[in-house]
Image: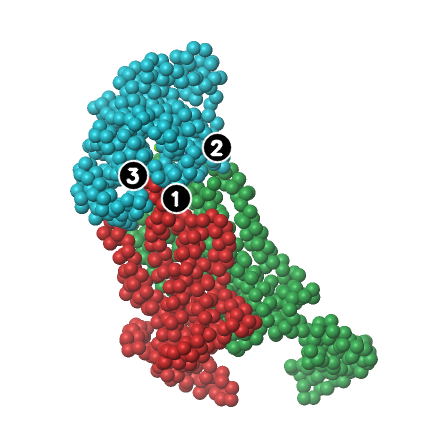
Amino acid sequence: MDKERSVVWLLLKRNIGFWICLGIVLFVVLLAIVGPLFAKYGPQETVTIVRIVNASDANRVAEELRERYGLAPADISISMYSIIKQLSNTTNTTELNTLAEECKSQGMQVKIYTQPIPRIECYDPSKMMVVAYIRSKPPSLDFPFGVDKQGYDVFSSTVYGLRVSLSVGVIAAIVATIVGTVLGLLAGYMGGWVDALIDAITNLLIAIPTVFLMLMIGLFYVVGGSAVGREVQNMVFLGLTVGLLSWQWVSRAVRAQVSALKASDFVSVSMLSGNSTIKIIFKDILPNIASYIFLVFVIQLANALGTVVTLEFLGIKAAEWSLFARINQYLMLGEHWSGNWWTLFIPGAIVVAMIASLYLMVLSLEEVFNPRLRKA
Amino acid sequence: MYLAVFVVAVTLVWLLIRLAPGDPALLAISRAVMTPGTPLSPEQVKQLIDTYRHKLGLDRPWLEQYAMFWYNLFRGYFGVSTMVQEDILGTIAVRLRNDLILLVPAIIVSWFLGNWIGAMAARYKNVDRVLIPIIYILTSTPYFLMGLLLGYALGVVYHVFTPTMTSTDIDAFLASPNWSTFTRFINTYTLPFLSMVLVSMGGWASGMRTLMIYELESNYARYMESLGFSNRRVAGYAFRYAINPQITGLGIQLGTVIVGGIVVSSIFNYPGVGILLIYAINYRDVFLIQAIAIVYTAMVIVANFVVDLIYSLLDPRIRLGVVGV
Amino acid sequence: MSATVLRLKEYKVYYKTFTGIVRAVDGVDLEVRRGEVLGIIGESGCGKSTMVQSLVLPKPPMFIAGGSAKLLGEIDLAKIDSNKRREVLLKNIALIPQYVMDALPAIKKIKVFIKDLAKDKGVEYEELVEKFVERLKLVNLPREVLDMYPIQLSGGMKQRVVISIATLFNPDLLIADEPTSALDVVTQRYVLELLRDLVNQKIAGSLMFITHDIASIRQIADRIATMYAGKIVEVGPLENVVSSPLHPYTAMLIKSVPTVEQSYKATRLSGLAGSPPSLINPPPGCRFHPRCPYAMDVCRREEPPMIEVEKGRFVACWLYAKK
Ligand SMILES: Nc1ncnc2c1ncn2[C@@H]1O[C@H](COP(=O)(O)OP(=O)(O)O)[C@@H](O)[C@H]1O
Ligand code: SF4
Ligand SMILES: [Mg+2]
């Protein structure tokens, strides 16, 4: 056993492809976890540059911004610097007063209206506000992944989106692996009617196109209204939905492994020596299929990611800023051909690299674990 | 067996709609209510909902509703859609025909190409090194990404093909197949077709590669080699063995391929069910989605049946009723 | 026609594995003569299959590490390329593999298999199929087998079909690797008689018969060679070796056999004390010394040479060699 382990390790060490793939996977996961720390913009925030300058400098600053970011004149606006605030109810006016104090301390002119609704307007005639809207910019030093048509920073959207989509995928893969393993164990170990029942359900799930069920469930539960503010809930729910509808292959594979093990000598010995079922499952069977289940999990993760991003494209998304949710919006508007390549293909490349790396990792691990596939 | 699967699947779809939070009637009329310019009073809304509920039979007991549902299914009545005013089934049928025009050739071409490529990879180590990453990247690409990528590259940047199709492109070709309608058809058909083929080809190739490696290591292959059979012949036998699971896979993969078809056709505005479904999802057109899901489920199950039939004809082990060999 | 069909000299076959080189066949000298049945006996894992597999299909991770294997005195099987080897396969040397049960491709009718064989061997199908039917008759199988799939055949029938195929071209050397171990007792005896007959009728020039079961070797062999841990340790005429084995290992093998009345199934060599050594790091000196009751100092240090004790009786053991 130890010898086998050292062989596996030796083989793995030599498999450069495996390490490249592992590197890619870790990088993408890292991007999803710590990426948002480096994101300059929030998931729903567009790239808008606001400068408050002396009135005399306004044109110069505008020109500077225009040149710096290569903006069209329409993307820059110069307006008077003002703060306008309106209250929604008429009772509490202290808020207005504090604001008024603040404005005055900055040397602004303040006008307060009490009718019809309390309102405050602060002006500073010596200052101007220059606003630059940055849209459709290819990757550059300022925006490593570019800026999309609506003015979202693609790096920020990607890392936040990745966080959502990856979480859903991981939840789905965990659910599918656990459910599949438990059912496969039960079916393979218990046999009899338990096996028959589980087999029937498994076959059913294999025979019907489950994506439609995912679509319908996702549709009703997740996006019954706006997704805003329910992201975590939605993520868990979508993950559960996808996971509960894709365990069928796990169960079938685990079942096969377990029945093979059950027939093997050492499990029979364990059974004969009067060990309890629970003990046999946890002591004799699970440790023997642990590495196999790990491989299954990795495959499930790859599959789930593919499903999740496709659902996003179809409009079933956990958050408004899910990785490919905006593609769906473009598609609905019929504008998907007028977009910018970086908007789609940078996140696309990341997802494809992730999924492909997961598959290839399993491929090399299988080659290592399975002597039949080892090539000298 | 197949009938049972169909009944269960359709029942699941039906149940999902009933169990969903949110009243199907409410969902069905939500668009009408949201339409600007026609502000409805709460009473009017309530009345509208009740009318719908009654029309859809939602005010009756569940069992009766379930029976009604099957009865309607047999009549080909699929409920009320807010998007498709006419007969839902008729609309789906035409689009389904178009989908089949896309899917059937795509499935056939990708299956044959993929199996061939996979077998090549398994046989020749040098080819394998190059092919493995390509195969796996292709199969890892979601259909919509492949569609957008190809459309963007070949349609928008280099104007080789047209990335948007109209239903007249197909209809004209079907009505009078001649050179000019054909070129017009191909001009728009190629991109969705290619997107479908590339992605699913990757899947078949990766499967075939693994299967073939196993077969070439098996005892009969070893035996044939030790009898002095040519490498070609041994590979031919191994291929014949390895193709069996790939035939079964055809039925199993169909669901995924169909979703791929929906996605791809919506991207290229291909007049299939795809774009209809996406609008239905985004506008929450429940009964339309239900109808599409049912029609496609039926299609997949029928296809599985056919595939099983072909399979049992091809494999003597099944045809002869020998089990466990 | 030369009297020697196959001569192995210092023949070495290793496996390249990740834990090291497995020296499965490590310097074997052996001769198979025309018209004889040479039995090779040894515990499972001692390298018997490796030795014969390497002659027909030295496929990675297996590789021929040295020595020569001259077929008919001219063709060195240790050196020829795969195309040349393909030409001698079946025509000069034919293997009945250990895994007969799943050797025939299950998805093709026997007829189709023969047809493809004819194509690849460059002979007429009609001729070959007639020859095959003739062979089938010899092994007591009807012509109808042609139209069957291998899965419709019983284990014994498969064995006989494989024998028929192996003898299609009257090979100079027929090799049977544990041909009886998967069969029931009655069929076992029948197959042994059949194989003997093939040599007697000169359909096969000679037979190399491999087994771990001394009882079956007694029924068929003219000469017997004992193999231990990748080496041949004793060679001699059957009767002499069985009645008075020279090598302690051969003696152990013969003693471990139950009397003839007992079931053949029970003849596993489990009665032997100890287990065969690692073939990655074989013990120095005589490889049998850790299990040998007569082991001496010299046995642990130096490898015993193969010496001819009497005419035709060879043994590699320090008990007989003068040092
Ligand atoms: N493919 C292989 N790779 C590595 N070692 C092998 C392989 N096949 C056999 N061996 C080793 O070679 C030795 C001899 O095996 P084998 O020739 O099958 O023995 P026998 O036929 O006498 O039972 C054994 O120790 C076995 O472990
Ligand atoms: S050489 Fe020594 S150890 Fe080897 S068999 Fe002879 S006596 Fe035993
Ligand atoms: Mg053997």
Question: Whole-Å distance between the Cαs marked 2 and 3?
Answer: 28 Å
**Residue C251 horizontal side relative to residue A51, left or right:** left
Q: Chain of mark 3?
A: C
Q: Are marks 1 and 3 in contact (CB under 8 Å)?
A: no
Instruction: Name the spot of residue A89 as percent of width and height, x first.
Output: 65, 82
Secondary element at image label 3: helix
The residue beneath circle 3 is C100
Image chain in cyan: C
Percent from the top left, x then y, of residue B281?
A: 45, 74
User: Within 8 Å of ligand 3, the CB of disc 3?
Assistant: no
The chain holding disc 1 is B
Residue C176 figure quarter: top left
Residue indicated by mark 2:
C21
The residue drawn where x is 45% and y is 86% is B43
* Residue type, label 1: Glu
According to the picture, the residue beneath numbered tag 1 turns out to be B217
Q: Position of residue A126 (x, y in %)?
A: 82, 81
Which chain is depicted red?
A: B
Whole-angstrom CA distance, mark 2 to mark 1, is 21 Å
> SS class of the residue under badge 2?
strand
Report if residue A204 is visible in the image. yes
Do discs 2 and 1 belong to a common subunit?
A: no
Q: Residue at x 54, y 76 (%)?
A: A335
Left or right: residue B17 compared with residue A72: left
Label 1 – label 3 distance at C-alpha: 15 Å
Chain coloured green here: A
Q: Classify C315 as above or below B211.
A: above
